[in-house]
């Protein structure tokens, strides 16, 4: 079986040999997905759903988006992270930065699954 992600990267997975190996290969391939951000500003709190890989390279995007929303007057956020992989310490640091940015404007950040 060949898996292809949104950037055209391919991973070959032999489903017939070892099911555990096939699952690990598929999981490894999934870490190649770029960070996707969905935002629903039609409700309070603003819902931010993250999927893909959060790391030192992609984390600044999340903080920048939230800073823009704060500049537009949003103060309450719910962060949905069920599809998120935090792949390094830099990604974890951006989550801490995100909470700090929201709190510094008097806002609230709820963490969802």
Image: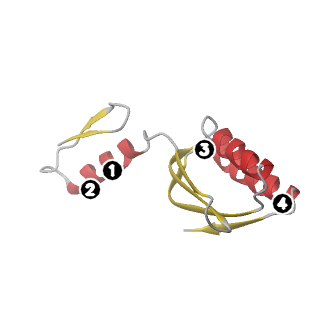
Q: Determine the CA span between mark 2 and mark 3.
A: 24 Å
Q: Name the residue under label 1.
A: 24
Q: Which of marks 4 and 1 is in front?
A: 4
As rendered, which of 107 and 18 lies closer to the eye? 107
Q: Determine the CA span between mark 3 and mark 4.
A: 24 Å
The earlier-in-sequence mark between 3 and 1 is 1
- Determine whether the residue tagged by mark 2 lies in a helix, strand or loop: helix
Residue 6 horizontal side relative to residue 20, left or right: right
| Tags 2 and 1 touching, CB below 8 Å | yes
As rendered, which of 55 and 109 lies closer to the eye? 109
Residue 36 horizontal side relative to residue 93, left or right: left
As rendered, which of 100 and 11 lies closer to the eye? 100
Give the quarter of the image for residue 96: bottom right
Q: Residue at 74% across / 52% down in the picture? A: 98
Location of residue 62 in the rendering, given as x and y in whole percent from the top left corner = 65, 46
The earlier-in-sequence mark between 2 and 3 is 2
- Considering the image in quadrants, where does the C terminus appear? bottom right
- Determine whether the residue tagged by mark 1 lies in a helix, strand or loop: helix
- Determine whether the residue tagged by mark 3 lies in a helix, strand or loop: loop
| Tags 2 and 3 touching, CB below 8 Å | no
Q: Mark 2 points at which residue?
A: 20
Q: Determine the CA span between mark 3 and mark 1.
A: 19 Å
Q: Residue at 48% across / 39% down in the picture? A: 34
| Tags 3 and 1 touching, CB below 8 Å | no
The earlier-in-sequence mark between 3 and 4 is 3
Location of residue 28 in the rendering, given as x and y in whole percent from the top left corner = 38, 44
Q: Which of marks 3 and 4 is in front?
A: 4
Q: Name the residue under label 4.
A: 103
């Amino acid at each position: 079986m060949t898996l292809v992600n949104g950037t055209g990267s391919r991973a070959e997975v032999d489903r017939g040999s070892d099911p555990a190996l096939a699952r690990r290969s598929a999981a490894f391939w999934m870490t190649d997905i770029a960070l996707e951000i969905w935002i629903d500003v039609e409700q309070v709190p603003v819902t931010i759903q993250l999927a893909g890989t959060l790391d030192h390279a992609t984390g600044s995007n999340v903080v920048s988006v939230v800073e823009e929303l704060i500049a537009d007057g949003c103060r309450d956020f719910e962060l949905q992270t069920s599809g998120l992989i935090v792949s390094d310490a830099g990604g974890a640091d951006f989550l801490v930065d995100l909470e700090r940015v929201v709190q510094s404007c008097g806002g609230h950040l709820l963490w969802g699954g």
